[in-house]
Image: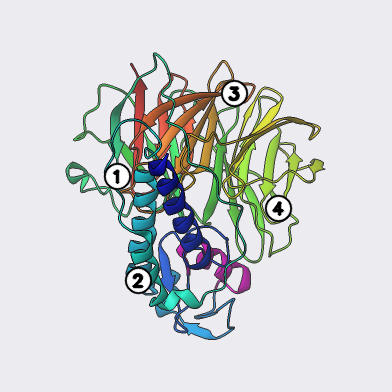
Amino acid sequence: MASNLSAMTAKSVLAKISEGHLECSICSTRFTEPKMLECLHSFCLECLVELKERLDPYSSRLKCPVCRRDTKLKGNNVEELPSNFRLRSLVEEVAKQEELLEGQGSPSPSPPPSPPLALAQEIESSPSAEVESSPSAEVESSPSAEVECPKEEWWLHKEIGSCIPEQHEIKNFNKIFHVASFSDNEIAALQYGKSELISIRTTRKLKYNGSISHQHEIAATPRLLAVNKDNELIVLNHSDYKSEVNFFNRSYSELPRKFNLNLEKDAPPTCLAVNEDNQIAIGRKIRQNISLYTRNGSLIDTLSNQRVGEHMTSYKQRWIYTNRVQRKLRSIDTNGDEIFAVDMPRCIPTFLGPEGVCCDKDGDIYVALSYAWSPSWGGKIHRFSADGEHIGCVIKGCGSPRGITLTPDGDLVVAAMESVKIYHPV
């Protein structure tokens, strides 16, 4: 009993530390890849990139959303801002202590965590402590043991990326956010901020020294992608001036069909999916809605109050999406009526948030859970039934997973930031 109480107290202290000092004031979640402005306020890299795109993508200065002071950007690039390594290490240390505390309530012995108060004293001296943060939810009780998915095993068949020593010819794989699959199992991927599309062959006979990846330059900067039933690649390009949906054939040549989206510049599209009827769904996190279009660009309907995040998929007449901040998996029909909305189970640590989502041929749902931008952290893939019931964890240690998809052959493809990982069911 004393051990359980001590673990609960330590977990509460860690949560308070996180709430007051380790949360980005833009996204209200823990810092990921924190970057520091000249005013010494820190924010997530991804948050600053989106902020710059909304304010002025061509400006060489960025205004701090807290104190309004300008920061001059080297090369007009947010990524060139100095990283707040101290803050990043504190976030990782708190996450490690939380992971250790998960087993404190079990009968088996576990190593005692470092005193959370020591972390608190270190954080108090960090410049980022000045950043305002919004209130977070109440501290949850200690999570239960993680549920393994029965009789389901996946093995890492291939990993493609510039981080792989044998693949030195592959250049600049560092922000792979989204993947999609064609009917012949070829994979299309994009990385944030690059004017290119990546094609990956998944033939299981190929080895690492084979020519398995090609990078195709395009005119625009893609943000989201999906493949429709006609094997066309749908790419959504967004800038401060317009949002446009383009179509590409299997040779990655742009088709003449395209259409513009009449969206406010401060509410960019954040997720994209296409269903078996070739309806295109585009979600916006800021507006919390989903707009449905025909393949010719005619607006079918706008579904409001949908609480979308950054990843969405479809299964028959359903749209399925995740919300990292709310830690939710949701499913709606084409009229916007809710089919289910489920919380991430308590066996999943709170520092792992739902990201990418895809469905198999039977409608079961796979959800990627990611901690941060750092690929050293072990992301996971969990499986849910078509009705939203949690089945269990199917893959561990898959880096920092974002978008995921299943190929027709049944391989699970993970956009893991610095690489694309392809898992095969055993």
Name the one closer to the observer, 13 or 348: 13
Percent position (x, y) of residue 267?
69, 60
Disc 4 + disc 3, Cβ < 8 Å: no
For label 4, the residue is 260
The reply, left or right, for residue 249 in relation to residue 270 is left
In primary-sequence order, the first of circles 2 and 1 is 2
User: Dot 1: what SS?
Assistant: loop
- Local packing at callout 1 (Cα closer than 10 Å; few below 14, some 14-19, many 20+) is many
Of the residues shown, which amino acid type is indicated by label 4?
Asn
For label 2, the residue is 122
How far, Cα to Cα, is label 2 from label 1? 36 Å
In primary-sequence order, the first of circles 2 and 3 is 2
Percent position (x, y) of residue 353?
50, 45
How far, Cα to Cα, is label 4 from label 3? 38 Å
* Residue at the (61%, 53%) spot, across then down: 137
Name the one closer to the observer, 142 or 276: 142
Name the one closer to the observer, 99 or 334: 99
For label 1, the residue is 161
Residue 133 seen in render: yes
Question: Above or below — where is 11 with respect to 247?
Answer: below
Q: Which residues are magenta?
A: 43-57
User: Dot 4: what SS?
Assistant: strand
Question: Magenta segment: does it hold 44?
Answer: yes
Of the residues shown, which amino acid type is indicated by label 3?
Glu
Question: Above or below — where is 253 with respect to 362?
Answer: below
**Secondary structure of the magenta portion, mostly?**
helix
Of the residues shown, which amino acid type is indicated by label 1?
Gly
- Local packing at callout 2 (Cα closer than 10 Å; few below 14, some 14-19, many 20+) is few
User: Dot 3: what SS?
Assistant: loop
Q: Quadrant of residue 202?
A: top left
